Image (spheres, helix red, strand yellow):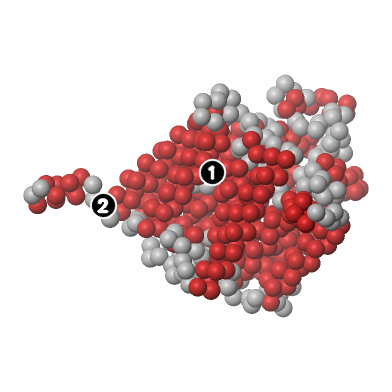
Amino acid sequence: MNVDSVLAKQALWPRGTPLATNLALLLFGIIAIEFCRTGVTEFHHFVHGFSESVFAQIAVYLGAISLIERCPTNKWTLRIILAVALVARLYCVFSTPFLSTDIYRYVWDGKVQAAGINPFRYIPADSHLAFLRDGIIYPNINRKEFAHTIYPPGAQFLFLAITRISATVPFMKLALVGFEAVTCLVLLRILKLLSLPPERVVLYAWHPLCFWEIASSGHIDGAALTFLALAIYSRLKDKSGLTGVWLASATLIKLYPAALLPAFFQRSKWKMVAIFTAIIALTYACYMSVGLGVFGYLSGYAQEEGIDSGTRYFLLAFANRTLHTSIQPLAYMLFCAAIMGAICVWALLRGSSSSAFVLSALVIATMLNVFYSPHYPWYFLWLLPYIAINPWRPAFYLVTASTYLFGTNLGAPGEPMYHLNLLLYGGFALMFCYDLVAQRMRVYSSLPDLRPTIEHTSLIPTASARNS
């Protein structure tokens, strides 16, 4: 082969250039979008299976991460990432929800409030609300015959605001995708602030869990992630008041972000805590006409999901099976509380540098999920904004593995769920141990994208940021 032919081939396929990176990334993006289409179709008309579509998306997602981390990029790389993320979500937005029916309750609660009625007062099947029933929203509400709404006041505010524009499921999902757009923009600001490559936003923007649980199923967690990202940005900018506002907003949508308070707290700066507490108290006060009914179906949900009886906790079941014991749920809860308390103290004592809290928050959120062992994949969504900033391997595995596993037959209640959790949390434990060994032996993964590039502790190995 002569020199001219070699040069001609290099001109056709300029390897090692931003153009080659972008062409390959665009191909990955088209495949990801196509599997959004097949994922929707496969759930109802089996050919190769919904879970296989998700698995393929995860493979594409990991390939895109590796490509971006290893190859040169330019301004078009980020544009491709954001464009693909938007198109994939829009395809899911206009499909009928098939993984969950929770979004119908969102629209219903918005309609109830628009009629001037406290959404916590009546169950949907109550005759007082008969005039609001229709042929689309009402028939698809889950637990409508016995359960009051479970969604906190912050979520209720959003339901009211969104349904005043359009009380339809597609628009509710579109609004949540709008929140996701804000999340991506805030993450880009955070990455710039920390001198990290903006392309790292792909860790959030292309994650299949966002496609299926926010754009397709329309879970309100998508809005909570926006406020969590805003809280991170405000904390990095050392704006304690705004940090309290955004963290309280996230908590008022999904209660579990309250656990992150120790990570966001800055010693001697109590303003954030005061604002956080005041906003939550005032928001709940808006719905206190029903008294303690403002907590809705929370106690019923705890009983239904085995939270109070202990049947839902994987680590408890694993310990009892492995050790042939009968540890009581209360003892397990006290054990978890002690460990979480120790982690919170660690977070408080780590120092108040601008970036140390990101890992602290991620560790708290991750361990809360491990102890709680959710039965639904959307409960892992809140880890993603932190992973985009500080990709701690165990947390990354937990989110990505749950995305696939819950779409398989192992996602069924009972014994299949136990085996799912064995794979999920067993893999997490192995990844956690690997990180500890890698730190001690300075053995690094071949995937630099899964290593943090900001301030870290011994939980994760060191690495330097790639130049953008």
Residue at the right extreme of this rendering: 291
Q: In which quarter of the image is the C terminus?
A: bottom left
Residue 333: quadrant of the picture: bottom right
Rendered image: mark on residue 208? 1
Q: Quadrant of residue 218?
A: top right
Q: Is disc 2 surrounded by few (<14), some (14 to 19) or many (20+) residues within 10 Å?
A: some
Q: Nearer the viewer, residue 278 or 384?
A: 384
Label 1 to label 2, Cα distance in Å?
28 Å
Measuring 67% from the left and 48% from the top, which residue is drawn there?
421
* Residue at the spot 42% in from the left edge and 49% down from the top edge: 64
| SS type, badge 2 | loop
On screen, 214 above or below 258? above
Residue found farthest to the front:
324
x, y percent for residue 36: 50, 35
Q: Residue at x 36, y 50 (%)?
A: 76
Q: Is residue 203 left or right of residue 140?
A: left
Q: Mark 2 points at which residue?
A: 15
Q: Is residue 120 left or right of residue 186?
A: right
Residue 106 image point, x, y percent: 72, 37
Write down the quadrant of residue 117 in the picture.
top right
What percent of the width, then of the height, locates residue 4? 9, 49
Up-down relation of residue 349 to residue 22 (above or below): below
Residue 323 in view (yes/no)? yes
Using the rendered image of the protein, determine whether residue 298 is visible from the camera's viewpoint: no
Q: How crowded is mark 1: few (under 14 residues within 10 Å), some or many (20 or more)?
A: many
Q: Which amino acid does label 2 sit on?
A: Arg
Q: Which mark is residue 131?
A: none
